[in-house]
Amino acid sequence: MVRIADYISKSAHHRPDEPAVTFEGRTFSWTQFEARCWAIAAMLNRLGVGHGDRVAFLGQNSHRQFECYLAPSRVGAISVPLNYRHAVAEMIECAADCTPSVLIVDRHFVDEARAIANACPSIQSLIYADDGPVPDGMGSYERLLAAEGDIDPKQFDDIASQDGDTVILFYTSGSTGTPKGVMLSHVNILSNAIGVAPHYGFCAEDTNLLSGPMFHLGSGSRVFTAVVYGAHTVVVPKFDVAEVLGAIQHHRISVVVWVPTMVTMILDHPKFDDFDLSSLRIINYGAAPMPIALIERAIAALPGIHFGQSYGMTEASPVLTILGPDCHELNGPLVDKLSSVGRPVPYVDIRVVDDAGNPVANGQTGEIVARGPQIMTGYWQQPERTAQAIRNGYYHTGDAGYIDDDGFVYLAGRVKEMIITGGENVYPIETENVLSHHPAIAECAVIGIPDELWGEAVHAVVRLKSDIQASEDELIAHCRDRLAHYKCPRAVTFRQEPLPLSATNKIMKSELRKPFLEGQPA
């Protein structure tokens, strides 16, 4: 029997007084953390939450969201971290899809939570999980926990989820622009935690910094890894360079997970050299391609620290391959592998296939597919899209790449036209759909173009109607009113002539990208 929350009990038994979670000056031991998680489970049960129900959380990183990753599964419920960077309409779309019965919110998103609750009749309880006065119409997270008193954990044995049951639901957009709820089970999550950590020597003695948004599994997966290994996690509300550097120094952080944009911001900070970062042992990066020049710069600026890259996606819980510290030794024998995303982790079977699904030879480019115990159980209430993604036992990543003779995986591009900007995934059709509703737009296309800071920038190419004018600022503002800001164009190119079409009358985005790729490495 696999139940991820049981690892809280394990640490509470073996490491009762060791720190579990620290947030904003407050540290909870494993014993305290265990008690709080049981109280949350009892609170949810008292609110009528049962097996298979959804509990949504909307807020910045906190110890409370850390708790809500785990506690709902103790009554068989499913945690749903909502993306606070979404526009309210997008949040409502996700909530309407998963129909949570409880929505927990912090002080930053009270108005958004009310809008979601008004639009989603499934939400029966709004819980305020923060300090300070409780807004009208909401219950107090802390007061409800305190009211539970002594709890007998055995009372939840019959309803707790386990093994293949869904623990958490992460929403990710698809190529159609509509959200998909990725269902991850106890087995999925445990497979990732125990399969990845040994590659970095992650252990109970580590202090892990959680600075990426917890609505993303890229950072959120470290919640589960820390719990499984009984390590201490320091949580910061969101990524702020000075706060992160200060946290590393103050808490003697040994492990961090960053996307390349974060690495750039850290290295570029004017007071970078003023902080003591000597406690750092591991810097794990991923979520977007890391330029070789940036890796070399980071290694030079942070000597003696082990670097490692992870490649994967939410559907893989999330790691498929790891490029370990041995490949980051600039004078080492494996330095030529720095352009790869590493080798598959032991529990993953990765192959590269052609359009017919047949494996291709080493060095030949095709679609990367994977199978293993970490692959999602499916998309929430979308069996057709699940069947499209998982075929013949393999999850089809949509990424193009190849495998060399040494077993290293290389990305050659993306089968889908996804843009990765600052670690965020943007599907062009979402932005194109919004742009196309502007009255001045005759036709448009959204592409990703190289950007030194963000990896890629969202860029729009448009042709206006002959009788209506619109400025770049107006079009960007139109998008920002309707989409998360990272999905909006950073710039717009205006064309007088029609957008180029292929023989099948599809816009040739490769032609639109060409002017922006001049001078870029092949």
Image (cartoon, helix red, strand yellow):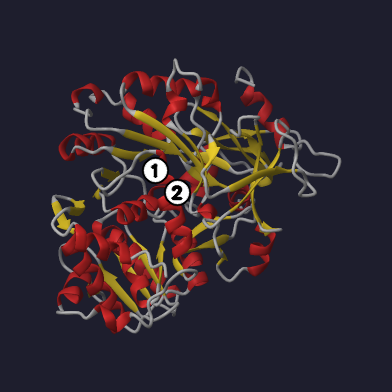
Residue located 64% across and 36% down the image: 413
Measuring 51% from the left and 44% from the top, which residue is drawn there? 345
Is 394 or 426 nearer to us in this picture? 394
Query: Which mark is drawn over residue 84?
Result: none
Q: Nearer the viewer, residue 333 or 88?
A: 333
Residue 169 spot, x, y in % from top left: 46, 64
Question: In the drawing, does residue 65 fall left or right of residue 515?
Answer: left
Residue 112 can be seen, yes or no:
no
Q: CA distance from mark 2 to mark 1?
A: 7 Å
Residue 76 at x, y = what percent? 40, 76
Foreground: 498 or 286? 286
Category of crowding for the residue at label 2, using alpha-carbon neighbours closer than 10 angstroms: few (below 14), some (14–19), many (at least 20):
some
**436 sits to left or right of 475:** right
Residue 85 visible in the current orientation: yes
Check whether the beta carbons of the residues at disc 2 and disc 1 lie within 8 A of each other: yes
Secondary element under disc 2, as helix, strand or loop, is helix
Judged left or right of residue 321, residue 264 is: left
Q: Mark 1 belongs to which amino acid? A: Pro
Check the image and report above or below for 104 versus 492: below
Residue density around tag 1, few if under 14, some if 14–19, many if 20 or more, within 10 Å: few
Q: Is residue 407 above or below residue 66?
A: above
Amino acid bearing label 2: Gly
Q: Position of residue 44 (x, y in %)?
A: 30, 78
Q: Residue 195's mark? A: 2
Q: Is residue 35 left or right of residue 391?
A: left
Quadrant of the frame with the C terminus: top right
At horizontal 36% and vertical 40% (from top left) the residue drawn is: 257
Q: Which residue is mark 1?
A: 198
